[in-house]
Amino acid sequence: MAIREGYYQDSVTVMNKGLEMVFVKILTIFTSIDLSHNNFHGEIPTTIGDLPSLIVLNLSSNHFEGLILSSLGNLKQLESLDLSNNKLVGRIPQQLASLTFLAYLNLSMNQLTGPIPQGGQFSTFPISSFVGNVELCGFPLSKKCGIPDEQPTPDEEPESEKGFSWKAVLVGYGCSFVIGAIGGNIVISKKPNWLVRIYGRRL
């Protein structure tokens, strides 16, 4: 691309904040890396963390593996980060929460785990930024961190804390019925005199 008077003369298409934008003339200070929809493998290069003036970083729809670099937190000017549709694993670095200019984030369709960082711009990102990572938890997802699905909800108390459980009640009723039946049979079969006096006749 020929550069004249500080402008690119040829057009360039960039995915910025989830939108495809065509720039015919852009300032040279507009710094963007868009390597989306390629067939790149391996880990994300660590040198990306040494580009503090980067505004847009789009590595989506590749085959990148490994962890999300914590050094991405050094990109203080970053406004758009798209790492979706890769094979990234591990936790989302807490350092990303310090990116105060980050307006767009897409980490969907990876294999990320653990809690989503809280604070900063992360409170503004929708669920769509994290879908497809079944092991992620925390806001804005409905899955809470540190609470397995099999544990009772706050409205439910373990049976040991409720006192008598329904099983204990059934056992009590059963025993009372058996004892009452046996005792009643004994009383009726012996025909005691006090029953004769009460009812005026022998049973």
Image (cartoon, rainbow, N blue to C red):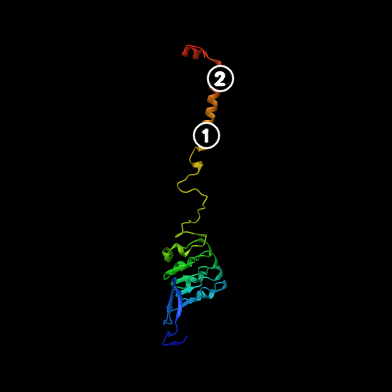
Residue denoted by label 1: 170
| Residue at screen point 55% across, 27% down | 178
Query: Whole-percent x and y of residue 6?
Result: 42, 85
Vertical arrangement, residue 188 with respect to residue 126, above or below: above
Q: CA distance from mark 2 to mark 1?
A: 25 Å
Nearer-the-camera pick, 158 or 143: 143
Q: Earlier in the sequence, mark 2 or mark 1?
A: 1
Pick the residue in front: 42 or 163: 42
Q: Is residue 81 visible?
A: yes
Q: Which residue sits at x=47%, y=14%?
A: 199
| Residue occupied by mark 2 | 186
| Residue 21 coordinates in the image, percent (x, y) | 43, 76
The image's mark for residue 63 is none
Task: Find numbered disc 1 in the image and state the secondary structure of the residue it sits on.
Answer: helix
Q: Which residue is at a point 46% across and 65% down the rendered structure image?
A: 129
- Disc 2 crowd rating (10 Å Cα; few below 14, some 14-19, many 20+) is few
Where 191 falls versus 52 (above or below)?
above
Corner quadrant of residue 67: bottom right
Q: Total number of numbered labels? A: 2
Q: Secondary structure at mark 2?
A: helix
Task: Residue at the far right: name it.
Answer: 42
- Is residue 118 at all visible to an observer of this figure? no
Q: Quadrant of residue 104?
A: bottom left
Q: Position of residue 130 (x, y in %)?
A: 48, 63
Q: Position of residue 158 (x, y in %)?
A: 50, 44
The amino acid on which the numbered mark 2 sits, given as a three-letter code, is Ile
Kindly indicate whether the residue at mark 1 contacts the one at mark 2 (C-beta within 8 angstroms): no
Please state which amino acid type lies under the numbered disc 1: Leu
